[in-house]
Image (tube, helix red, strand yellow):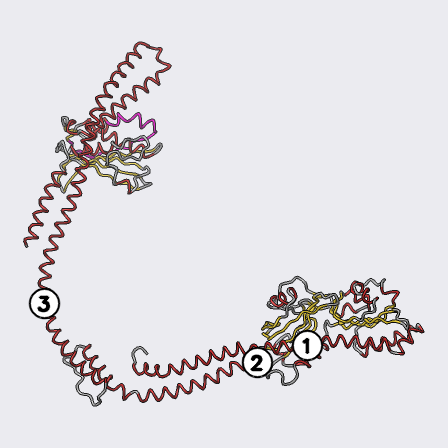
């Protein structure tokens, strides 16, 4: 459709017909909803009224039979003569002829003494000689009191029904009874007794079939339509001609009792509206196994209480079938019209589309790279011919423009190549500028910090060292004066002396870090093994206290030129840091090897390794920064001072670590120290800046 103009023209022609068909379908749906459905609901409402009226007529008919019986000469003669045998025979005969389930005469003197709850509630009205007829619900026990064995006739086994409210009951013991009560009086209008008759509706078919035949006679429903009437006790179908399954439903009035949906229950929605709210239901509802156009009405007993429901309805499927049949026939007719129109349009579009086919072939040739394709002259003279002429003119212009573009492109490529080379040089120079400026800024900040720190530590050293010397002197004098009496406080005295020496050590570290130029002492050439062994004597007490074992492996044989005291300070710092990383007993590994570049030995390497907690990647970048520490009591100067000492010797410190696996610090010392009193990196950066500036100037000039 997207690639064919013929199909688009076909669509534009058929679209009005398609919209007409859609409009017809919507109109049919609206007509069905607003008219047909309304007519169906009006019909089922009338059916319910007829069914309810027929049930009332049956009650009145039952009452009329009792009135005729009470006024008959034979009945009154038997009463006057108290001929009980003849009386019971006459009642039995009427009971059989009228299909009553029970018919009895209750003397007036026994009326108030009967233990029948349903009759007790009506006694007062009967004493006033009021004829009564209606529906009552009697339990099996009360029916058995009236006549032994009647209670079992109303027993119904409940059947699980879709859409019904779940219940734990399995059997319905109660019975719905059409009952008539007619008081009988003597010639002096005195009550002498009551005629009581009843027809049990449970498990019966005569009443509902009689109503069904009257409401849904021949010709009232479409073919295959099923009209049904049901009597409910509460929400249980006790008498119905609704089939248990759809196959048996086509038997109509010939359904057996087992084929009827007796024992099934009404849907929860209908139960709520009719039995609980007391409203009349008129709508479509799911009845046992199919959808019905349904009407439900509550049934009231003698006391105007809801005893059950009466239902009338017919299957919805035949009417739905008629509706869809109408839609299909109309749709088929419209489809045939559209098909004929499509064939005619499709055959006659070739004349219209012939110029377009030629234009399309020329466009395809241009796309494939053919030289100078043109449409040429066409036979017709319409808008498409004008389009073809303009297309040829456009191809001529495009060919001319393409030649101009190729020439301009060749010139532009040469200029771009020259400019790109120049920009690449300037970019490289600019990157070098930025790198060197960043390094310079960092160095200047460090120098500024050191200058401030130097002034501060000089004052601190002067103000603290003098009191510290006085404290040490007085402590020595105190120990000498007390002699053996100092023993109880010896630990405290040693602690004071130790802390004073610690203060001096801190001051010396600060001075050494802030003014490295004042700590350039003499250098001597020694074996690293000797330096390490002398250092271990200094830290042996601390290692033994923590139960840390030192494992040594010395293979370096090249002497190094160092300031022994400063290098020992570095090793003490690294060894103690390694022991602290263990956080308990363990091992620290010390090893040495020659430092070689190519085949030339230029010094020795000392490695201090542990299997402690390691250093995280984010801390690895900051460990040599001054005042950075992860220890609660650390100053953050140990590694920074150590790094400065080794750099002033012309060596280097490198570190590798993995969290949870441990760390390894490598100290590189030269056999001939390149002693310097400052970090030469700043001069190197300035030289690099000058070199980058010269490169940039050459790039600009080129």
Q: Which residue is mark 1?
A: 51
**x, y (%) of residue 501?**
27, 22
**x, y (%) of residue 380?**
22, 89
* Mark 1 vs 3: CB contact within 8 A: no
Q: Which mark is on residue 318?
A: 2
User: What residue appears at the point 61 percent right and 78 percent down from the top-left corner?
Assistant: 43
Q: Is residue 6 magenta?
A: no
Q: Which residue is mark 3?
A: 410
Sequence-first tag of 3 and 2: 2
Label 3, secondary structure: give it: helix
> Distance of mark 3 from mark 2, alpha carbons?
82 Å
Q: Which mark is on residue 473?
A: none
User: What residue appears at the point 32 percent right and 27 percent down from the top-left corner?
Assistant: 544
Give the farthest residue toward the right: 81
Q: In the rendered view, tell whether residue 142 sits above or below residue 335.
A: above
Magenta segment? 535-560
**x, y (%) of residue 41?**
59, 76
Q: Nearer the viewer, mark 3 or mark 2?
A: 2
Sequence-first tag of 1 and 3: 1
User: What residue appears at the point 48 percent right and 83 percent down from the top-left corner?
Assistant: 328
Q: Quadrant of residue 1?
A: bottom left
């Amino acid at each position: 459709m997207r690639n064919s103009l013929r199909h688009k023209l076909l669509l534009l022609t058929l679209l009005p017909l398609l919209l007409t068909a859609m409009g017809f379908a919507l109109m049919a749906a609206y007509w069905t909803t607003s008219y047909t459905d309304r007519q169906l609901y009006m019909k089922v409402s009338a059916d319910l009224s007829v069914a309810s009226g027929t049930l009332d007529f049956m009650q009145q008919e039952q009452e009329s039979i009792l009135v005729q019986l009470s006024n008959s000469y034979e009945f009154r003669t038997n009463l006057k003569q108290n001929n009980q045998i003849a009386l019971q025979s006459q009642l039995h005969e009427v009971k059989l002829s009228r299909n009553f389930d029970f018919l009895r005469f209750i003397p007036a003197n026994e009326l108030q003494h009967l233990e029948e709850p349903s009759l007790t509630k009506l006694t007062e009205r009967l004493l006033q000689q009021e004829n009564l007829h209606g529906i009552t619900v009697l339990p099996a026990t009360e029916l058995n009191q009236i006549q032994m064995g009647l209670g079992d006739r109303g027993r119904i086994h409940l059947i699980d029904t879709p859409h019904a409210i779940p219940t734990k009951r399995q059997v319905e013991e109660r019975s719905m009874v059409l009952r008539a009560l007619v008081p009988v009086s003597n010639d002096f209008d005195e009550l002498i007794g009551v005629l009581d008759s009843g027809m049990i509706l449970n498990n019966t078919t005569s009443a509902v079939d009689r109503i069904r035949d009257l409401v849904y006679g021949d010709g009232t429903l479409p073919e295959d339509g099923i009209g049904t009437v049901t009597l409910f006790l509460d929400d249980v179908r006790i008498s119905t001609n609704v089939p248990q399954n759809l196959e048996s439903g086509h038997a109509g009035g010939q359904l057996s009792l087992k084929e009827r949906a007796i024992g099934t229950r009404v849907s929860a929605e209908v139960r709520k509206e009719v039995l609980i709210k007391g409203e009349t239901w008129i709508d479509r509802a799911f009845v046992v196994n199919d959808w019905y156009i349904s009407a439900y009405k509550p049934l009231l007993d003698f006391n105007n209480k809801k005893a059950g429901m009466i239902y009338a309805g017919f299957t919805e499927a035949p009417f739905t079938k008629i509706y869809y049949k109408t839609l299909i026939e109309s749709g088929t007719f419209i489809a045939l019209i559209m098909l004929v129109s499509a064939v005619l349009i499709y055959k006659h579009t070739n004349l219209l589309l012939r110029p377009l086919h030629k234009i399309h072939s020329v466009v395809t040739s241009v796309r494939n790279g053919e030289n100078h394709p043109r449409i040429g002259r066409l036979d017709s003279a319409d808008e498409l011919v004008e389009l073809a002429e303009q297309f040829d003119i456009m191809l001529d212009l495009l060919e001319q423009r393409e030649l101009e573009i190729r020439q301009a492109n060749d010139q532009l490529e040469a200029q771009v190549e020259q400019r790109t080379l120049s920009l690449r040089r300037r970019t490289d120079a600019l990157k070098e500028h930025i790198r060197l400026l960043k390094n310079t800024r960092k160095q200047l900040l460090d120098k500024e910090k050191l200058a401030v720190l130097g002034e501060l530590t000089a004052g601190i050293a002067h103000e603290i060292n003098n009191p510290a010397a006085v404290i040490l002197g007085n402590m020595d004098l105190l120990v000498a004066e007390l002699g053996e009496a100092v023993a109880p406080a010896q630990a405290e005295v040693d602690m004071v002396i130790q802390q004073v020496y610690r203060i001096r050590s801190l001051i010396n570290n600060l001075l050494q870090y802030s003014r490295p130029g004042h700590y350039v002492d003499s250098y001597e050439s020694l074996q690293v093994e000797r330096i390490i062994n002398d250092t271990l004597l200094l830290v042996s007490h601390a290692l033994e206290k923590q139960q840390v074992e030192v494992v040594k492996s010395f293979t370096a044989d090249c002497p190094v030129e160092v300031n022994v005291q400063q290098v020992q300070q570095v090793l003490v710092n690294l060894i103690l840091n390694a022991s602290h990383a263990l956080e308990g007993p363990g091992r620290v590994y010390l090893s040495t090897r020659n430092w070689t570049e190519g085949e030339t030995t230029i010094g020795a390497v000392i490695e201090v390794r542990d299997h402690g907690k390691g250093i995280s990647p984010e801390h690895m970048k900051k460990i040599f920064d001054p005042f950075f520490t992860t220890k609660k009591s650390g100053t953050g100067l140990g590694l920074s001072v150590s790094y400065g000492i080794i750099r002033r010797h012309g060596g280097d410190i490198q570190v590798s670590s993995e969290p949870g696996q441990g760390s390894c610090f490598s100290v590189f010392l030269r056999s001939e120290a390149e002693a310097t009193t400052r970090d030469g990196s700043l001069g190197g950066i300035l030289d690099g800046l000058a070199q980058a500036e010269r490169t940039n100037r050459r790039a600009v000039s080129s």
